[in-house]
Image: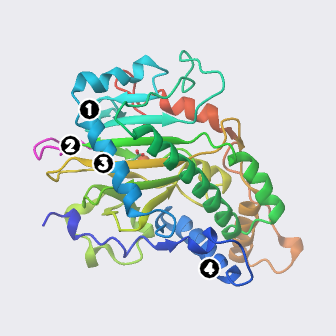
Amino acid sequence: MDSASRVGTSTNLPIIDISPWLEPSSTDNAGRRKDVSAALHSACLTHGFFYLNISSFVTPDETDELTRLAREFFSLPEEEKLKLSLSNQDGARGYARLKENVTNGLADNHEGLDFYKPVQMPDRTKPVWGENQWPTVSGFQAKYQIWIEKMKTLGMIVMEAMSVGLGMSHDEWEELKNQVDDSFWVMRVIGYPPLPNDENGFSCGAHKDYGCLTFLYADPTPNALQVFIPNSKLPISPEDVIPPEAKTAGGVWINADPIPGCFVCNIGEMWEVWTNGLYSATLHQVVHRGSNHRVSIPFFFEPNFDALVKPLAAALRLQDCAGNLTNGAKDHSEETTHATKYKPAVYGDFLVGKVGGNFATSKGKYD
Ligand SMILES: O=C(O)CCC(=O)C(=O)O
Ligand SMILES: [Fe+2]
Protein backbone atom coordinates (compact mmCIF):
# COMPACT_ATOMS: atom_id res chain seq x y z
CA MET A 1 0.00 0.00 0.00
CA ASP A 2 1.47 3.36 -0.88
CA SER A 3 1.57 6.31 1.48
CA ALA A 4 -1.38 8.14 0.00
CA SER A 5 -3.78 5.22 0.26
CA ARG A 6 -3.16 5.02 3.98
CA VAL A 7 -4.29 8.60 4.49
CA GLY A 8 -7.91 8.91 5.63
CA THR A 9 -10.48 10.58 3.43
CA SER A 10 -13.76 11.10 5.21
CA THR A 11 -11.93 11.92 8.45
CA ASN A 12 -11.15 15.29 7.00
CA LEU A 13 -13.72 16.08 4.35
CA PRO A 14 -17.41 16.21 5.28
CA ILE A 15 -20.18 14.73 3.12
CA ILE A 16 -23.04 17.18 2.61
CA ASP A 17 -26.34 16.00 1.16
CA ILE A 18 -27.77 18.87 -0.92
CA SER A 19 -31.18 17.19 -1.45
CA PRO A 20 -33.24 19.52 0.83
CA TRP A 21 -32.17 22.37 -1.48
CA LEU A 22 -33.17 20.42 -4.58
CA GLU A 23 -36.74 20.00 -3.34
CA PRO A 24 -39.20 22.90 -3.51
CA SER A 25 -38.96 25.06 -0.42
CA SER A 26 -41.56 24.19 2.25
CA THR A 27 -42.09 24.45 5.99
CA ASP A 28 -41.22 20.77 6.10
CA ASN A 29 -37.68 21.16 4.73
CA ALA A 30 -36.83 24.61 6.16
CA GLY A 31 -34.90 23.10 9.06
CA ARG A 32 -33.06 20.60 6.87
CA ARG A 33 -32.13 23.37 4.44
CA LYS A 34 -30.68 25.41 7.32
CA ASP A 35 -28.65 22.42 8.47
CA VAL A 36 -27.22 21.96 4.97
CA SER A 37 -26.33 25.67 4.81
CA ALA A 38 -24.63 25.50 8.18
CA ALA A 39 -22.66 22.44 7.05
CA LEU A 40 -21.54 24.26 3.86
CA HIS A 41 -20.47 27.26 5.94
CA SER A 42 -18.49 25.10 8.33
CA ALA A 43 -16.82 23.17 5.46
CA CYS A 44 -15.83 26.43 3.75
CA LEU A 45 -14.43 27.86 6.98
CA THR A 46 -12.19 24.83 7.40
CA HIS A 47 -10.98 23.18 4.19
CA GLY A 48 -13.01 24.73 1.40
CA PHE A 49 -13.38 21.14 0.16
CA PHE A 50 -16.24 18.74 0.79
CA TYR A 51 -18.22 15.93 -0.78
CA LEU A 52 -21.58 16.97 -2.15
CA ASN A 53 -24.11 14.14 -2.19
CA ILE A 54 -25.99 14.69 -5.45
CA SER A 55 -27.47 11.20 -5.79
CA SER A 56 -31.00 12.59 -6.03
CA PHE A 57 -29.96 14.86 -8.95
CA VAL A 58 -27.48 12.86 -11.02
CA THR A 59 -27.75 9.18 -11.93
CA PRO A 60 -24.78 6.82 -12.35
CA ASP A 61 -26.00 6.18 -15.92
CA GLU A 62 -25.43 9.83 -16.81
CA THR A 63 -21.90 10.01 -15.46
CA ASP A 64 -21.03 6.58 -16.91
CA GLU A 65 -22.14 7.81 -20.33
CA LEU A 66 -20.08 11.02 -20.06
CA THR A 67 -17.05 8.95 -19.06
CA ARG A 68 -17.61 6.55 -21.95
CA LEU A 69 -17.82 9.44 -24.44
CA ALA A 70 -14.67 11.01 -22.98
CA ARG A 71 -12.80 7.73 -23.32
CA GLU A 72 -13.97 7.36 -26.91
CA PHE A 73 -12.55 10.80 -27.69
CA PHE A 74 -9.24 10.24 -25.87
CA SER A 75 -8.71 6.93 -27.66
CA LEU A 76 -8.77 8.65 -31.08
CA PRO A 77 -5.46 9.02 -32.96
CA GLU A 78 -3.49 12.09 -31.85
CA GLU A 79 -3.92 13.80 -35.26
CA GLU A 80 -7.73 13.55 -34.90
CA LYS A 81 -7.65 15.11 -31.44
CA LEU A 82 -5.29 17.85 -32.59
CA LYS A 83 -7.91 18.98 -35.11
CA LEU A 84 -9.54 20.58 -32.05
CA SER A 85 -6.31 22.20 -30.86
CA LEU A 86 -6.58 25.24 -28.62
CA SER A 87 -4.45 27.12 -31.13
CA ASN A 88 -7.34 27.03 -33.66
CA GLN A 89 -9.27 29.23 -31.30
CA ASP A 90 -8.59 31.62 -28.44
CA GLY A 91 -5.91 29.50 -26.74
CA ALA A 92 -8.41 28.40 -24.09
CA ARG A 93 -11.20 26.47 -25.85
CA GLY A 94 -10.37 23.09 -27.32
CA TYR A 95 -7.93 20.23 -26.96
CA ALA A 96 -4.70 20.46 -24.98
CA ARG A 97 -2.41 17.53 -25.73
CA LEU A 98 -0.48 15.70 -23.03
CA LYS A 99 1.85 18.08 -21.14
CA GLU A 100 0.53 21.19 -22.92
CA ASN A 101 -1.02 22.45 -19.71
CA VAL A 102 1.49 23.87 -17.26
CA THR A 103 1.19 24.43 -13.50
CA ASN A 104 3.93 26.04 -11.43
CA GLY A 105 6.22 25.90 -14.45
CA LEU A 106 5.94 22.09 -14.76
CA ALA A 107 4.11 20.28 -17.56
CA ASP A 108 1.00 18.44 -16.37
CA ASN A 109 0.76 14.77 -17.31
CA HIS A 110 -2.76 15.00 -18.71
CA GLU A 111 -4.70 15.78 -21.87
CA GLY A 112 -7.94 17.73 -21.83
CA LEU A 113 -10.81 19.27 -23.70
CA ASP A 114 -11.89 22.67 -22.40
CA PHE A 115 -15.25 24.37 -22.97
CA TYR A 116 -16.38 27.80 -21.81
CA LYS A 117 -19.70 29.56 -21.82
CA PRO A 118 -20.42 30.54 -25.45
CA VAL A 119 -20.22 34.27 -26.16
CA GLN A 120 -22.41 36.47 -28.37
CA MET A 121 -19.79 37.79 -30.79
CA PRO A 122 -16.96 35.24 -30.83
CA ASP A 123 -13.51 36.60 -31.64
CA ARG A 124 -10.69 34.07 -31.42
CA THR A 125 -8.08 36.81 -31.25
CA LYS A 126 -9.43 37.79 -27.82
CA PRO A 127 -8.56 35.64 -24.76
CA VAL A 128 -11.39 33.15 -23.91
CA TRP A 129 -13.64 34.81 -26.52
CA GLY A 130 -13.51 32.14 -29.22
CA GLU A 131 -15.82 29.25 -29.99
CA ASN A 132 -16.03 25.83 -28.37
CA GLN A 133 -14.69 22.93 -30.42
CA TRP A 134 -16.87 19.83 -30.08
CA PRO A 135 -15.61 16.35 -30.98
CA THR A 136 -17.49 14.49 -33.69
CA VAL A 137 -17.81 11.44 -31.38
CA SER A 138 -21.48 10.49 -31.73
CA GLY A 139 -23.64 11.86 -28.91
CA PHE A 140 -20.78 13.77 -27.27
CA GLN A 141 -22.06 17.31 -27.76
CA ALA A 142 -25.70 16.47 -26.99
CA LYS A 143 -24.94 14.64 -23.73
CA TYR A 144 -22.42 17.20 -22.51
CA GLN A 145 -24.74 20.09 -23.28
CA ILE A 146 -27.40 18.52 -21.10
CA TRP A 147 -24.75 18.12 -18.39
CA ILE A 148 -23.75 21.79 -18.61
CA GLU A 149 -27.36 22.90 -18.08
CA LYS A 150 -27.64 20.61 -15.06
CA MET A 151 -24.43 21.90 -13.53
CA LYS A 152 -25.55 25.52 -14.02
CA THR A 153 -28.78 24.70 -12.17
CA LEU A 154 -26.83 23.02 -9.38
CA GLY A 155 -24.47 25.99 -9.18
CA MET A 156 -27.31 28.43 -8.50
CA ILE A 157 -28.78 26.08 -5.90
CA VAL A 158 -25.51 25.64 -4.01
CA MET A 159 -24.83 29.39 -4.17
CA GLU A 160 -28.21 30.13 -2.58
CA ALA A 161 -27.63 27.49 0.09
CA MET A 162 -24.22 29.05 0.81
CA SER A 163 -25.73 32.54 1.06
CA VAL A 164 -27.95 31.28 3.90
CA GLY A 165 -24.94 29.64 5.57
CA LEU A 166 -23.14 32.96 5.47
CA GLY A 167 -26.10 34.70 7.12
CA MET A 168 -27.12 36.75 4.06
CA SER A 169 -30.57 38.32 3.95
CA HIS A 170 -32.89 37.59 1.04
CA ASP A 171 -32.04 40.98 -0.53
CA GLU A 172 -28.34 40.34 -0.15
CA TRP A 173 -28.77 36.99 -1.90
CA GLU A 174 -30.65 38.71 -4.75
CA GLU A 175 -27.65 41.02 -5.18
CA LEU A 176 -25.16 38.14 -5.16
CA LYS A 177 -27.40 36.18 -7.51
CA ASN A 178 -27.02 38.97 -10.07
CA GLN A 179 -23.28 38.27 -10.11
CA VAL A 180 -23.61 34.56 -10.93
CA ASP A 181 -26.86 34.17 -12.88
CA ASP A 182 -25.06 34.29 -16.24
CA SER A 183 -22.13 32.17 -15.07
CA PHE A 184 -19.02 32.26 -17.26
CA TRP A 185 -18.70 28.53 -16.59
CA VAL A 186 -15.85 26.28 -17.68
CA MET A 187 -15.99 22.54 -18.19
CA ARG A 188 -12.90 20.36 -18.58
CA VAL A 189 -12.89 16.79 -19.76
CA ILE A 190 -9.54 15.44 -18.61
CA GLY A 191 -7.67 12.24 -19.46
CA TYR A 192 -4.84 11.12 -17.20
CA PRO A 193 -2.48 8.39 -18.36
CA PRO A 194 -0.50 6.82 -15.51
CA LEU A 195 2.37 8.97 -14.27
CA PRO A 196 5.49 6.82 -14.61
CA ASN A 197 6.90 5.81 -11.22
CA ASP A 198 10.31 7.19 -12.06
CA GLU A 199 8.90 10.54 -13.21
CA ASN A 200 9.12 13.27 -10.64
CA GLY A 201 6.22 15.27 -12.08
CA PHE A 202 2.52 15.70 -11.48
CA SER A 203 -0.61 14.65 -13.30
CA CYS A 204 -1.88 18.11 -12.40
CA GLY A 205 0.33 20.37 -10.29
CA ALA A 206 -0.72 22.04 -7.03
CA HIS A 207 -3.14 24.91 -7.56
CA LYS A 208 -6.20 26.67 -6.23
CA ASP A 209 -9.23 26.99 -8.50
CA TYR A 210 -9.79 30.59 -9.39
CA GLY A 211 -13.51 31.00 -9.58
CA CYS A 212 -16.47 30.20 -7.47
CA LEU A 213 -17.49 26.51 -7.15
CA THR A 214 -15.97 23.37 -8.67
CA PHE A 215 -18.12 20.26 -9.10
CA LEU A 216 -15.83 17.36 -9.81
CA TYR A 217 -17.09 14.11 -11.22
CA ALA A 218 -14.24 11.63 -11.58
CA ASP A 219 -14.22 7.95 -12.51
CA PRO A 220 -13.70 5.62 -9.51
CA THR A 221 -9.86 5.63 -9.67
CA PRO A 222 -8.51 5.98 -6.10
CA ASN A 223 -5.30 7.73 -4.96
CA ALA A 224 -5.28 10.45 -7.61
CA LEU A 225 -6.76 13.74 -6.35
CA GLN A 226 -5.04 15.10 -3.24
CA VAL A 227 -6.03 18.06 -1.08
CA PHE A 228 -3.57 20.04 1.02
CA ILE A 229 -4.54 20.37 4.68
CA PRO A 230 -2.38 22.82 6.61
CA ASN A 231 -1.30 21.62 10.08
CA SER A 232 -3.36 24.39 11.67
CA LYS A 233 -6.52 22.85 10.19
CA LEU A 234 -5.94 19.23 11.05
CA PRO A 235 -8.57 18.15 13.58
CA ILE A 236 -6.28 15.45 14.90
CA SER A 237 -2.62 15.11 15.54
CA PRO A 238 -0.92 14.40 12.20
CA GLU A 239 1.07 11.59 13.82
CA ASP A 240 -2.14 9.68 14.53
CA VAL A 241 -3.07 8.71 10.99
CA ILE A 242 -0.82 10.39 8.49
CA PRO A 243 2.26 8.47 7.44
CA PRO A 244 5.43 10.58 7.49
CA GLU A 245 5.80 10.36 3.67
CA ALA A 246 2.53 12.26 3.15
CA LYS A 247 3.72 15.24 5.18
CA THR A 248 5.26 18.25 3.59
CA ALA A 249 6.16 21.71 4.78
CA GLY A 250 3.28 23.09 6.81
CA GLY A 251 0.73 20.33 6.31
CA VAL A 252 -0.26 17.07 4.69
CA TRP A 253 -1.73 15.94 1.41
CA ILE A 254 -4.82 13.79 1.87
CA ASN A 255 -6.62 11.78 -0.79
CA ALA A 256 -10.05 12.90 -1.91
CA ASP A 257 -11.08 9.59 -3.46
CA PRO A 258 -14.38 9.40 -5.32
CA ILE A 259 -17.45 8.42 -3.28
CA PRO A 260 -20.38 6.98 -5.29
CA GLY A 261 -23.27 9.45 -5.58
CA CYS A 262 -21.07 12.40 -4.61
CA PHE A 263 -19.06 15.12 -6.31
CA VAL A 264 -15.91 16.45 -4.76
CA CYS A 265 -16.74 20.11 -4.42
CA ASN A 266 -14.41 22.99 -3.64
CA ILE A 267 -14.51 26.75 -3.61
CA GLY A 268 -12.29 28.98 -5.71
CA GLU A 269 -10.56 32.28 -5.12
CA MET A 270 -13.65 34.41 -5.79
CA TRP A 271 -15.14 33.05 -2.56
CA GLU A 272 -12.01 34.25 -0.75
CA VAL A 273 -12.73 37.74 -2.05
CA TRP A 274 -16.47 37.62 -1.29
CA THR A 275 -15.77 36.51 2.29
CA ASN A 276 -12.75 38.78 2.80
CA GLY A 277 -10.64 35.70 3.51
CA LEU A 278 -13.08 34.00 5.89
CA TYR A 279 -13.32 31.09 3.44
CA SER A 280 -10.21 29.80 1.74
CA ALA A 281 -9.64 28.21 -1.62
CA THR A 282 -7.48 25.18 -0.93
CA LEU A 283 -4.51 23.80 -2.83
CA HIS A 284 -5.04 20.50 -4.57
CA GLN A 285 -3.15 18.36 -7.07
CA VAL A 286 -3.43 15.11 -8.98
CA VAL A 287 -0.81 12.36 -8.79
CA HIS A 288 -2.13 9.37 -10.71
CA ARG A 289 0.31 6.47 -10.58
CA GLY A 290 -2.31 3.76 -11.04
CA SER A 291 -2.28 1.61 -14.18
CA ASN A 292 -5.49 2.88 -15.84
CA HIS A 293 -6.33 5.95 -17.93
CA ARG A 294 -8.23 8.13 -15.43
CA VAL A 295 -11.04 10.43 -16.60
CA SER A 296 -12.31 13.40 -14.62
CA ILE A 297 -14.88 16.03 -15.58
CA PRO A 298 -14.66 19.15 -13.44
CA PHE A 299 -17.34 21.76 -13.96
CA PHE A 300 -16.39 25.23 -12.78
CA PHE A 301 -19.43 27.30 -11.87
CA GLU A 302 -18.05 30.82 -12.06
CA PRO A 303 -19.30 34.39 -11.61
CA ASN A 304 -20.61 36.32 -14.62
CA PHE A 305 -17.82 37.64 -16.84
CA ASP A 306 -18.50 41.24 -15.83
CA ALA A 307 -19.28 40.58 -12.15
CA LEU A 308 -17.56 42.96 -9.77
CA VAL A 309 -16.55 40.65 -6.95
CA LYS A 310 -15.87 42.34 -3.61
CA PRO A 311 -16.20 41.48 0.08
CA LEU A 312 -19.82 40.87 1.06
CA ALA A 313 -21.42 42.74 3.96
CA ALA A 314 -22.51 39.42 5.52
CA ALA A 315 -18.90 38.19 5.68
CA LEU A 316 -17.73 41.47 7.19
CA ARG A 317 -20.47 41.21 9.81
CA LEU A 318 -19.26 37.73 10.77
CA GLN A 319 -15.69 38.95 10.96
CA ASP A 320 -16.71 41.95 13.08
CA CYS A 321 -18.66 39.70 15.35
CA ALA A 322 -15.72 37.30 15.77
CA GLY A 323 -13.38 40.28 16.34
CA ASN A 324 -15.66 41.72 18.99
CA LEU A 325 -15.93 38.40 20.77
CA THR A 326 -12.14 38.14 20.82
CA ASN A 327 -11.78 41.72 22.02
CA GLY A 328 -14.43 41.23 24.68
CA ALA A 329 -16.65 44.04 23.34
CA LYS A 330 -19.62 44.55 25.63
CA ASP A 331 -21.88 46.89 23.75
CA HIS A 332 -22.50 48.26 20.27
CA SER A 333 -20.27 51.32 20.85
CA GLU A 334 -17.23 49.04 21.10
CA GLU A 335 -17.86 47.37 17.73
CA THR A 336 -15.10 47.61 15.20
CA THR A 337 -15.46 47.43 11.45
CA HIS A 338 -13.40 44.74 9.85
CA ALA A 339 -11.04 46.11 7.22
CA THR A 340 -11.54 44.73 3.74
CA LYS A 341 -8.33 42.86 2.90
CA TYR A 342 -9.34 41.88 -0.62
CA LYS A 343 -9.53 44.33 -3.48
CA PRO A 344 -12.63 44.21 -5.72
CA ALA A 345 -11.98 42.22 -8.90
CA VAL A 346 -13.92 42.00 -12.14
CA TYR A 347 -14.14 38.24 -12.65
CA GLY A 348 -13.47 38.29 -16.41
CA ASP A 349 -10.27 40.35 -15.97
CA PHE A 350 -9.09 38.00 -13.25
CA LEU A 351 -9.83 34.97 -15.44
CA VAL A 352 -8.02 36.36 -18.49
CA GLY A 353 -4.98 37.04 -16.30
CA LYS A 354 -4.99 33.41 -15.15
CA VAL A 355 -5.65 31.47 -18.36
CA GLY A 356 -2.88 33.25 -20.20
CA GLY A 357 -0.43 31.38 -17.98
CA ASN A 358 -1.83 27.87 -18.32
CA PHE A 359 -0.09 26.62 -21.39
CA ALA A 360 3.37 25.46 -22.29
CA THR A 361 4.60 28.59 -24.01
CA SER A 362 3.96 30.76 -20.97
CA LYS A 363 5.04 30.75 -17.38
CA GLY A 364 2.51 28.60 -15.56
CA LYS A 365 -0.58 29.68 -13.75
CA TYR A 366 0.71 29.87 -10.20
CA ASP A 367 4.23 31.19 -10.79
O1 LIG B 1 -8.89 15.81 -12.08
C1 LIG B 1 -9.03 16.16 -10.92
O2 LIG B 1 -9.28 15.36 -10.01
C2 LIG B 1 -8.89 17.61 -10.53
C3 LIG B 1 -8.64 18.57 -11.65
C4 LIG B 1 -8.47 19.97 -11.18
O3 LIG B 1 -8.18 20.23 -10.05
C5 LIG B 1 -8.68 21.12 -12.12
O4 LIG B 1 -8.83 20.89 -13.34
O5 LIG B 1 -8.70 22.27 -11.64
FE1 LIG C 1 -8.51 22.32 -9.62
Identify the mark at residue 193; answer none if there is no mark: 2
Q: Residues within 10 Å of mark 1 (few under 14, many from 20)?
A: some
Task: Identify the magenta region.
Answer: 194-203
Residue at numbered disc 4:
35
- Please indicate whether residue 233 sits to the left or right of residue 35 in the image: left
Q: Residues within 10 Å of mark 4 (few under 14, many from 20)?
A: some
**Is residue 77 placed above or below 152 in the rendered structure?**
above
Which numbered disc, 4 or 3, marks the residue closer to the eye? Answer: 3
Q: Is residue 211 visible?
A: yes
- Residue for point 63% across, 61% down: 157
Observer-nearest residue: 8 or 153?
A: 153
Q: Is residue 208 magenta?
A: no
Which element is circle 1 on? loop
The outermost residue toward the top is: 125
Identify the mark at residue 68; answer none if there is no mark: 3
Which element is circle 3 on? helix
- Residue for point 45% across, 45% down: 143
What percent of the width, then of the height, locates residue 18?
55, 70
Identify the mark at residue 98; answer none if there is no mark: 1
